[in-house]
Amino acid sequence: MNKVVVGAQWGDEGKAKITDLLAADAEVIIRYQGGCNAGHTVVANNKTYKFHLIPSGILYGNKTCFIGAGTVILPESFEKEVNELIEEGIDVSGLKVSPLASITMPYHTEVDGYSEDNAKKGKIGTTKKGIGPTYTDKVARFGLKIEDLYSPEALNEKLDVILPLKNKTLEKVYGLQPYSKECVLALCEKYAEIFRPYVCFDWQEMLENSRKKQILFEGAQGVMLDVDYGTYPFVTSSNPIGGGACTGSGYGPKMIDEVIGVAKAYVTRVGEGPFVTELTDETGDKIREIGHEFGVTTGRPRRCGWFDAVTMRYAVLVGGLTSVALTKIDVFDSFDEIKVCTAYKDTRDGKIYKSYPTNVYIHKYLEPVYETHKGWGEDITGIREYNKLPENAKKYLARLEELLEVPISIVSVGPDREQTIFRG
Ligand code: GDP
Ligand code: IMO
Ligand code: MG
């Protein structure tokens, strides 16, 4: 069974924990989109590992971990991550990078930082890792790919086209320093060395040979940050949805059997953008504190709110989810009441939205319609069987399944590998 792990909310749902668990049965793990904007945490062997780009399956040491064509790679970040794993004694011999992946150049990071720091209006709250500008150049056919680093002729030709216009934009639009061709060539030489041990020039053969193997596709970010389906423009610049696994990996849709959407028992969001169930009161603070809701990549406090079945049903639809892995339900152990948003109400005319309204500019007029569930008031972090969960926790899960119309196949009750309940 080939599976895709997709974030079902605004990222940080605990995808890496679920990917790491499912990777035990996979032979090939493919990261299909995003870059080092992602911050993925795996707790295993009494250690906490932080990943940004490298597939979480790397910890097993004996898997092929492929960074696909749909990703963008900041070379220095990749190098740092690999070196940290090597220092930890992790075997990275299975790590492979697609020659078609896009390179984040220093000017991409500078432009991202400039745009964020100088935005008077419409700030996105990006991770400033150059993600948007790298994807922009890729789509504008102005980007550099890993394979260019090993083809001096292509690199030369491309830079002659890219640099004059790039420099004009850098100077005139952003007031930033231009890049000489010599400087970019020197950077590319350095990058070629960073990637050399990992570039998978025979990726077609590798994918062909892996057809009969168990493949796990690893997504970053989440459906609500998808550039086509998320809370646009407050999104990332790639396609975290299940469909993104195809374009980003090089495999067709028939290669996918299951799409597992990872969702927290509540919702968090980092950066700007609408968030109808956001709690700006002490309940939000309590969730943040108990759930340790601070960004892995930027350290920013995450905005917290109640579970939102409106966006989640939307995520089931456009994310192509076949089941849900519900994480962090243990965060509610000390809560008397837990709320779930089942619809939105427009405060202007009372209109009820059961389906997700895609025009985010009306979200400021929307308020959540909640139903309230009783808490269970006990520590569930040691429970490993579904039937042993407190009745109120089971009722809560059953209600979510009813609202989402897909099964909750995994319940996570703590950050550790072992703190997981698999259902049938
Ligand atoms: P990702 O980006 O989706 O992989 O998620 P992050 O790693 O950014 O954030 C999830 C955080 O929650 C990490 O610190 C995980 O160790 C932690 N975590 C994952 N599952 C659970 C869970 O079921 N309970 C608790 N308490 N923490 C969890
Ligand atoms: P993981 O994989 C949460 C958010 C940023 C910002 C928006 C655009 O750990 O779930 P970008 O730098 O991508 O251009 O920023 O997307 N964002 C994330 N939020 N988790 C992530 O990754 C994120 N990656 C980007 O905060 O709002
Ligand atoms: Mg994260």
Image (cartoon, helix red, strand yellow):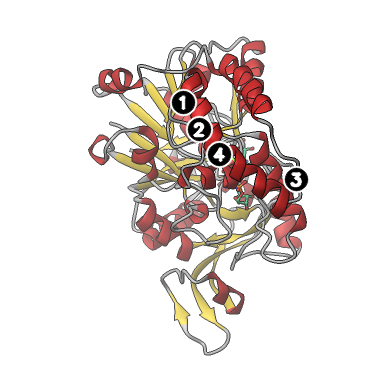
Q: Which residue is mark 2?
A: 158
Q: Residues within 10 Å of mark 3 (few under 14, many from 20)?
A: some
Nearest the eye: 265 or 351: 351
Question: Residue 93 at x, y = what percent?
Answer: 49, 10
Q: Secondary structure at mark 2?
A: helix
Q: Amino acid at mark 2?
A: Lys
Q: Residue at x 28, y 31 (%)?
A: 1
User: What residue sits right under mark 4 in the picture?
Assistant: 162
Q: CA distance from mark 3 to mark 1?
A: 26 Å
Q: Is residue 153 visible?
A: yes
Element class at badge 4: helix
Of callouts 1 and 4, which one flags the residue occurring earlier in the amino acid sequence?
1
Mark 1 to mark 2 CA distance (whole Å) = 6 Å
- Which residue has dot 1 on it? 154
90 with respect to 198 (left or right) = right
Q: Are marks 4 and 2 in contact (CB under 8 Å)?
A: yes
Which of pointers 3 and 2 lies earlier in the amino acid sequence?
A: 2
Give the residue type at disc 3. Leu
Q: Disc 3 designates what residue?
A: 176
Q: Quadrant of the C terminus?
A: top left
User: Hey, what amino acid is under mark 4?
Assistant: Ile
Mark 3 or mark 4, which has the lower sequence index? 4
- Discs 1, 2 touching: Cβ within 8 Å: yes
